[in-house]
Image (cartoon, coloured by chain):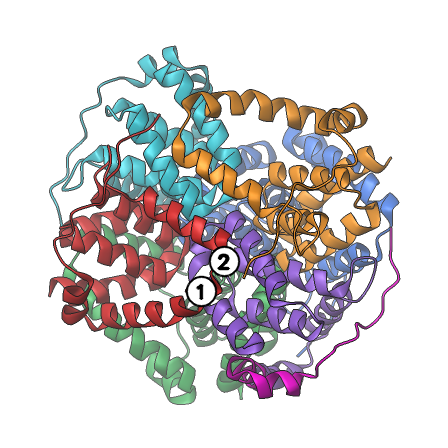
Chain colours: A orange, B purple, C red, D green, E blue, F cyan
Amino acid sequence: MNSDRREPNYLLTEKQVADKSEIARRFYEARTRLNANVDKADNILVKRFSNLDHSTYLESTIPAKYKELMGMVASACLRCDDCISYHIIQSYRLGVTRVEQEEALNVALIVGGSIVVPHLRRAYELLSELYG
Amino acid sequence: MNSDRREPNYLLTEKQVADKSEIARRFYEARTRLNANVDKADNILVKRFSNLDHSTYLESTIPAKYKELMGMVASACLRCDDCISYHIIQSYRLGVTRVEQEEALNVALIVGGSIVVPHLRRAYELLSELYG
Amino acid sequence: MNSDRREPNYLLTEKQVADKSEIARRFYEARTRLNANVDKADNILVKRFSNLDHSTYLESTIPAKYKELMGMVASACLRCDDCISYHIIQSYRLGVTRVEQEEALNVALIVGGSIVVPHLRRAYELLSELYG
Amino acid sequence: MNSDRREPNYLLTEKQVADKSEIARRFYEARTRLNANVDKADNILVKRFSNLDHSTYLESTIPAKYKELMGMVASACLRCDDCISYHIIQSYRLGVTRVEQEEALNVALIVGGSIVVPHLRRAYELLSELYG
Amino acid sequence: MNSDRREPNYLLTEKQVADKSEIARRFYEARTRLNANVDKADNILVKRFSNLDHSTYLESTIPAKYKELMGMVASACLRCDDCISYHIIQSYRLGVTRVEQEEALNVALIVGGSIVVPHLRRAYELLSELYG
Amino acid sequence: MNSDRREPNYLLTEKQVADKSEIARRFYEARTRLNANVDKADNILVKRFSNLDHSTYLESTIPAKYKELMGMVASACLRCDDCISYHIIQSYRLGVTRVEQEEALNVALIVGGSIVVPHLRRAYELLSELYG
């Protein structure tokens, strides 16, 4: 079964987030620099994967903000700091509150266990910068 | 930061789900049988863990149904069929539609990759029994 | 950078493999039954993922048989029996010898450690049926 | 740095354990059947890996029983039921008490999170058969 | 079944370890800085998780030093450098010898495979500073 | 079943690779520094593991270059940057082309999902340095 899809309505631009958080700024900077190599290679399967990845998080039956939080919980359980930062920032841009971010991180903590704790600590640092 | 918590309002009892789906029925049956041993052991740390696990998914700032879907996405990425079934059933009891279940499974598929596919297939079997 | 892609030239049909190996026969049977539900749902993102998955293993600069073995090694390290069986069967259909299968399994064993051993045992059972 | 190594002193034979627990009996039976294929293949790297695996758990500066429990905790966190059963049985043969088994499982539960719970349930079933 | 629990008797304070090892000093410093954000948030579920985590490693039927080594083996198999460092330091404070640390790391290496090697190398660096 | 084994014929020395790529140079430097501690400890089980690891990737029925790519795919799916870099460099030294490296990375991406993407980005940075 399928659902209509459309670009979500971001409340903040990437630049506005980067101006607010040093961690977010460094995240965007590293991603831009590294993606330059990937884009230059122009690998067709990588591009198809990226398009599919993009489609997955579009606004649909499930609001985009909850899909970003789902991606964040999965990233925390699989323990990828880059991915956690990305989804926290995306959620933030979609209006997710700090309490909601912490609630989602609690799901990741109980599912994934104490091995998630170092990532949780770093996630809270980003939350502090974003929500101040 | 914290959020008020309360028991979610289930639209269906476990028995009603078990009557509708053979997979759900077997899931409950196995869980009941195995939990008997765990309960009998009365291990205090296991009990504290279970209580914390229960608290995590309570209705709060994030609706319980989305927390169950977050747990499902994490379970699919960590590839535990029992956990996937549990969260699909819980979501179903909270009124999540089939389209929403599939949207959440799509997040798990893109984050976790093709290694998730065998679990996705089994999840769709459960979805077919539940949503008919 | 990209590589030309084309369907690989299978030396054996799925049916021929199923006639030779009971494990392969049950694998195909379960996959067919479960895929019926997935196909019926006609989820567009699942279909795009499946197409991309298919494209990845096509004959290209790297012979298809080595890509199937790569998928098998990854599956063994991530410990998914269904995925291991699938890639062993695909490699077999592409003319991979038993010695090559074991060599690839050795890579999985050293990278993934003793947690791979139970999967290795089940893989050897399938190898015994296929290569007799 | 190295430690003297010697075979541990088992208090019970495999047969005695199999007579006491149906789960242990089936575990041994499946392992014997599957290992026949592996042994027949006589793969030199698999044999060297098995020898190294065996050496790792020998009685040394750390008593063998605690090394088996370490293997059990790692197996539970990596979520392999076969490996968990193996190490529980080995620990049992070395005189580990039920309370010690549960204490070790508690470490696995807190490190690995709720995704470990289904394995914990099955582990408790084996504990019940062994310790009655 | 339960076991009496009490705080373990540390032979060294955190400060004494930090004075001996630069890696330990930086580990404590980063943890202190990051925990400040977590503590400030005062999230009730995170606090309950931390308390449960603390209880798990208390002196009990299994000596605390072996539980720390179990946590270390699990952390190495799940490949978290922060967690490995933490448990190596805790074990060190409880009187674990270098030979015992290496024996436990050997269990992690055989269970987890060569993917553990980069973490093993970094662990040996910490061991050299502590026992050097 | 076994295969003859012999050292592969490297087209480039480690020094030649380090002169070409800053990432490779730093990788070798860190490995050399960290291995000094490991070698000094002279742990017999670590040495046996290293020997077995070395034997696994020798030229045999499967050409060494494809075994290195298998190791790379497994490393990417298990998400270890050090291991990915190592196998990309080894493959490069054995004459693997950039297109082949990308094809292998595509297998890792589809099997492992978007959680692999940050590692893919860093891998492409190394590819750019090596293949210029």
Which residue does the image show at 75% across and 58% down from the upper left?
Answer: E49
Q: Quick one: SS at disc 1?
A: helix
Q: Which three-letter amino acid code belongs to the residue tagged 2? A: Asn
- Give the residue at mark 1: C38
Q: Is residue B22 left or right of residue A94?
A: left
**Over which residues does the magenta segment extend?**
B1-30
Which residue does the image show at 43% across and 17% down from the upper left?
Answer: F25
Q: What chain does badge 1 belong to? A: C
Q: In this view, does E54 lie above or below F50?
A: below
Q: Is residue E108 above or below residue F18?
A: below
Q: Is residue A34 left or right of residue D49?
A: right
Q: Distance between the residues labelled 2 and 1?
A: 8 Å
Residue F58 drawn at (x, y percent): 21, 36
The circle drawn on residue A88 is none
Q: Residue E94: in sight, yes or no? A: no
Q: Which three-letter amino acid code belongs to the residue tagged 1? A: Val
- Tag 2 and tag 1, C-beta contact below 8 Å: yes
* Pointer 2 local density, CA inside 10 Å: few below 14, some 14–19, many at least 20: some
The circle drawn on residue C43 is 2
Which residue does the image show at 50% across and 51% down from the upper left?
Answer: C45
Residue E60 drawn at (x, y percent): 68, 67
Which residue does the image show at 38% across and 43% down from the upper left?
Answer: F74
Q: Is residue B8 left or right of residue F119?
A: right
Q: Quick one: SS at disc 2?
A: loop
Residue D61 drawn at (x, y percent): 47, 54
Q: Which of marks 2 and 1 is nearer the N terminus?
A: 1
Residue D22 drawn at (x, y percent): 41, 86
Q: In this view, does A131 lie to the left or right of B72?
A: right
Q: Quadrant of residue D23?
A: bottom left
Residue E57 vs residue A35, the one in the foreground:
A35
Q: Quadrant of residue E37?
A: top right
